[in-house]
Image (tube, rainbow, N blue to C red):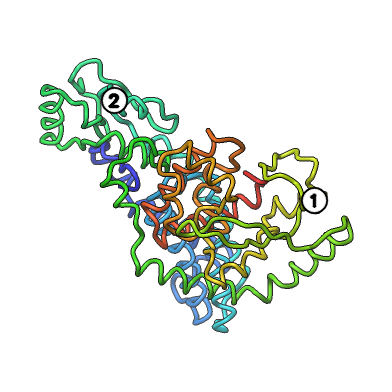
Amino acid sequence: MKSLPARRFKRLYEQVLLSRPFALIMGWLFSVAFPAAAYWGVQVFERPNTGQQTALIATTFAFLLSHFGAKNLLSRYPGGRSQGLITTQVVVFYGATIIGTLLLRIEVSRLLLLASGGAALVWFHIEYILTRAYFKPKLAVIPGGFADEVLALPNCDARPLAKLDLAGTRYDGVVADFQVLNADEARFLTACALANVPVYNAKTVFESMTGRVKIDRMSENNIGALLPSSAYELTKGIIDRAIVLATIPFVLPVGIITAILIRLESPGPVIYTQTRIGRGNKPFTIYKFRSMRFDREADERFAGEDDLRITRVGRVIRKLRIDELPQFLNVLKGEMSLIGPRPEQPSFVEEFDKKIPFYSYRHVVKPGITGWAQVRHGYAANSDETKIKIEHDFYYIKNCSLTLDFLIVLLTIKTMLSGFGAR
């Protein structure tokens, strides 16, 4: 289960106002019809000419991409339905539409597309603000075992049941740790299911809400589930290389300018190489633009936010993730993917493998330039934070798909703009 659906709204007006068709119609009127009427007048809907028809189709297409991208794809995962992601997704979908019309040489008003994109941006923010309270999961929790961790989650309305009775309160579901149920609790959950109230395992809810898979509570079945399909890995590898090759004309000038600035600021090589552990626990050489003062004899250690070794240029390229661009070569060599768990240094892997159960299982997939842990957790400076970061990596491995990869791309763009987790 990737997300918890809102199931408690069963009154007719609630089902209408919170329904997909209502949001789709209102969003289209605000984001497509209103800008078109303001640009051409309301008569555009009576007798539109060929150019106006094309513009209406293009703006409708861009809006539908944004709408279904947010509703069907992104909101399936933790963090996919967030106000901070709205701007990124609208810019990406409308930008893709504008680029598509340019490449296909379709005559359409760019001004109208921009106006529609601005209106869509406003609409999605309005919709999010008005509906976020209704889509926040409201859960009845039977205390005990892993269910206590659900009660501690900050992003859901989880209420402990003092007795086995919902007392007429509408909930999106009932949560319990199935491993510690007694007979009365099991019968109560059965009665809830018969009354059309969803029943969830606490661990499933925890993973759905946090985007983490608990490392110290995995069974053999869980481990077996953390295996990506061969078809997905093959498709992802092809897409990785295609994106790298397609972006070379843009990446190369940025890389040349970065290299010049690095050499001007401090002595030492422009490209920094280091041994990291990749898929199958195999070591490989990773490439990065040097962002610190050069010291080949320095010990391996975490680079803190205020690390004095970081240069002025390095601070900028770390925040914008430009220092990772040389890893495109690792992608072409098949050692890395664009998206996956970040590779660690051998000494760190050896240390964490002793402290954290199943740590090395994160090496079942190729490491990535960006990943779920980077956009959800940020930088890990110690073993406790690393444990949480690994839980995010395990969630990614368990749920990896092209849809989740696309969400990570959008969150990475948002991260680059905000500097979250940059070290």
Q: How many marks?
A: 2
Q: How far across and how far down the image is residue 80, in percent?
A: 45, 49
Q: Residues within 10 Å of mark 1 (few under 14, many from 20)?
A: few
**Residue at 55% across, 48% down:** 374
Q: Quadrant of the C terminus?
A: top right
Q: What label does residue 295 carry, if any?
A: 1
Mark 2–mark 1 distance (CA, rounded to whole Å): 49 Å
Q: Residues within 10 Å of mark 2 (few under 14, many from 20)?
A: some
Judge whether 364 appears above or below 392 on screen: below
The three-letter code of the residue at mark 1 reads Asp
Foreground pick, 253 / 291: 291
Judge whether 306 appears above or below 319 on screen: above
Tag 2 and tag 1, C-beta contact below 8 Å? no
Disc 1 secondary structure class: loop
Q: Is residue 165 left or right of residue 135?
A: left
Frontmost of labels 2 and 1 is 1
**Residue at 44% across, 29% down:** 154
The three-letter code of the residue at mark 2 reads Gly
**Residue at 73% across, 59% down:** 272
Snapshot quadrant of residue 88: bottom right
Snapshot quadrant of residue 335: bottom right
Residue linked to disc 2: 145
Foreground pick, 37 / 346: 346
Judge whether 38 appears above or below 176 on screen: below
Q: Is residue 238 left or right of residue 276?
A: left
Q: How far across and how far down the image is residue 255, in percent?
A: 74, 67
Furthest residue in direction top, as rendered: 162
Q: Is residue 46 left or right of residue 163?
A: right
Q: How far across and how far down the image is residue 390, in percent?
A: 47, 43
Disc 2 secondary structure class: loop
